[in-house]
Image: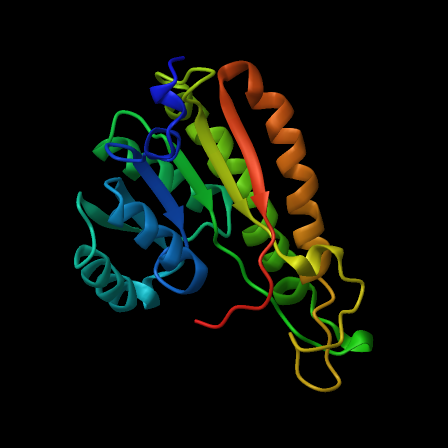
Amino acid sequence: MSEQDLAISSLFNVKGKIVLVTGGGVGIGKMIAAAFARNGATVYIAARKEAQLKEDEQAVEDLKKVATAGVHYIVANVGSKAGCDALISEFKKRETNLHVLVNNSGVTWGGPFLNYPEEKGWDNVFAVNVKSIFYMTAGLTDYLAKGATAYDPGRVINISSTASVDPHSEGPLSDAGNGTWSYQPSKAAVNHLTSQLAVKLAPSFITANAILPGCVGN
């Protein structure tokens, strides 16, 4: 590694990289996608469900205004292994490798402590927030490892939350009388899963890191 390689423009250069951002049509995901697009990466954003198709079409048009390379979207629901597999399969039809995977898709649910729903409250939240990270990462490990080196590794970036370390479930994230009982545990699971992935993927020259944003509006 030369001294020139240590320049900011080199260390943080994403020109020519291929990036996939789940939930990239709104909020934090769209901001992440825009940053990569603006700086020369080819960016794919994945919709959470068909109903968001128009929204993601608009997001792509917005991103193209600042992009210096291609911006694309794939309609996919990562709330199940089958949905993750479908997204991975479609992505692999379009590209032969991947440099950065941003697991950003996430949902929450508010409900009363004594009557918190199982399917919407627990199952879906953990499916989208935790299981999708595992299945997306495992399914794209071969692409992330292609050409990866110790100096230029593949990257997995998982979007967690400051809620992952906050024990208060009844607060600003839910209506009065309700709590986000599953959201905080799901994001805590994201933190630990990220550590597991980091250990597993390191020998393949792939890094895994989590970002913990606070409350952010769309």
Query: Tell me, what colour scheme is on the image?
Result: rainbow
At 33% across and 51% down in the image, what residue appears? 35
**Total of numbered circles in the picture?**
0
- Find the residue positioned furthest to the front: 3
**Quadrant containing the N terminus in the rendered view:** top left
For the question of whether residue 113 can be seen, the reply is yes
| Direction from residue 96 to residue 175 in the image, left or right | right
Residue 30's image quarter?
bottom left
Q: Vertical placement of 33 versus 192: above or below?
A: below
Residue 78 location (% of width, % of height)? 46, 49
| Direction from residue 183 to residue 3 in the image, left or right | left
Residue 113 location (% of width, % of height)? 80, 75
**Of residues 142 and 124, the one drawn nearer to the viewer in this rendering:** 142
**Of residues 216 and 120, the one drawn nearer to the viewer in this rendering:** 216
For the question of whether residue 76 can be seen, the reply is no
**Quadrant containing the C terminus in the rendered view:** bottom left
Q: Vertical placement of 182 versus 103: above or below?
A: below
Residue 56's image quarter?
bottom left
At 53% across and 28% down in the image, what residue appears? 207
Residue 176 location (% of width, % of height)? 71, 87
Residue 14's image quarter?
top left
At 29% across and 68% down in the image, what residue appears? 55
Q: Vertical placement of 96 versus 83: above or below?
A: above
Residue 40 location (% of width, % of height)? 23, 41
At 32% across and 62% down in the image, what residue appears? 50
